[in-house]
Amino acid sequence: MLQLSNKRIVLGVTGGIAAYKSAELIRLLTKLGAQVRVVMTSAACEFITPLTLQALSHNPVHLDLLDTRAEAAMGHIELARWADAVLVAPATADFIARLAGGHADDLLTTVCLATNAPICLAPAMNQGMWRDSATQQNCEELVERNIQLFGPDEGSQACGDIGPGRMLEPEQIVAKTAELFSQDILTGLKVLITAGGTREDIDPVRYICNHSSGKMGFALAEAAVAAGATVTLISGPVQLPTPERVTRLDVISARDMHQAVHDQLADVDIFIGCAAVSDYRPAEVAREKIKKDPENSSEIMEIKLIRNPDIIASVTALEQPPFVVGFAAETHNVLGYAADKMRRKRMDLVVANDISDWEIGFSSDCNEVTVIGEELEEPLPRASKTVVSRQLLQIIARRFRAKQTNTTE
Ligand code: C5P
């Protein structure tokens, strides 16, 4: 389980001897799945080269506040917005003082002021500097502003002193960083989602499809990433941008989707089948455009359809299926049909929605659903698909954990 999967960490490096440990810190953060962007102060560059940290983080290192080229690529505000957390390690006495004073005279202090993400500092300095009342007051001020301090540790120091002020070891800093996200309900889990409708060819010009917009599946993918999951989204043809940090695979037909799902299933913890999959496809796809026959006076044209594979049922039939959630879009007897579908397809949960109500129908931005499971019937009130997704994932995460506990007991 990668505890920092997809998390975006801005690592600030300031000018102390412990800066050499930043290299190891980046290695450990990326090993846990984090994306790391490094911001160095000019003093930090005296202790370790930007090139080293660039190579390890696989991203350009950010050095200057007033560099037009750097600002055009990813400026201080973009960096501040990009971050899920800002970690400054090592944090020198001078940096702590400048941050406490609200300065914004270099890139790192500016990012810290601008960000809404949690900020954590790993102080590193001589024991006398740490004990000094100015540093202590600055730290108190920062803690009051919800900035977390990781350490410092006690022990022998580079200057020969023994006492408090040593930077925590990179392993300890990484563990504390991961803890920041441990409350995320899907941290470390792999989620596979299908979305949109499928398109079944009749001939090179025509096809059968449905009204699915893909909005619900895409909202779920976005919410799952925000909840800490690694998300793959398999989408039928839709007009929607890919949510950030989501791996998207585009497919056309039900059979493509079936294949893509089974190709992606390895290590998946939760599978959410949100797509409106065509139950049938034309038994034969004409190689050339089907023409109207002027000789034929009949008003009727017949297309023979053949059943598509049921993707959800094929996943639940596996020897070790993931936790499976399906959707049931119905126009009448909504809860009855949904519950029946859940049992028939052996899903863990089914999300029922009434598509006869146009406000919560296929292309709408809103939804109102009832989540059905074994001894569970939980209605979620009408809200945007984003809000409904967050609530749905709460229930999914809760039931997933409960099932895991039951099967391991
Ligand atoms: O039976 P029905 O199509 O109403 O079931 C809906 C649920 O089953 C949805 O979760 C949908 O994604 C899934 N499904 C599927 N493969 C099909 C048809 C539906 O996975 N061929």
Image: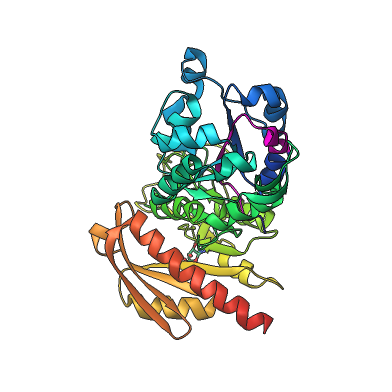
Q: Position of residue 73 (x, y in %)?
A: 51, 21
**Residue displayed at 34% across by 58% down:** 387
Tell whether 240 sits left or right of 281.
left
Closest to the observer, 99 or 54 = 99
Q: Position of residue 15 (x, y in %)?
A: 62, 29
* Magenta-colored span: 3-23
Was residue 293 drawn as part of the magenta stretch in this picture?
no
Tell whether 105 sits left or right of 256.
left
Looking at the image, is 198 positioned above or below residue 337? above
Looking at the image, is 65 positioned above or below residue 194? above
The mark tally for this picture is 0
Q: Position of residue 60 (x, y in %)?
A: 62, 25
The type of colouring in the image is rainbow
Was residue 6 drawn as part of the magenta stretch in this picture?
yes
**Residue displayed at 43% across by 23% down:** 105
Q: Is residue 247 visible?
A: no
Looking at the image, is 254 positioned above or below residue 344? above
Q: Is residue 162 visible?
A: yes
**Residue displayed at 56% across by 22% down:** 63
Q: Position of residue 371 (x, y in %)?
A: 40, 73
Quarter of the image for the C terminus: give it: bottom right
Closest to the observer, 367 or 261 = 367
Residue at the extreme top: 68
Quarter of the image for the N terminus: give it: bottom right
Closest to the observer, 216 or 148 = 148
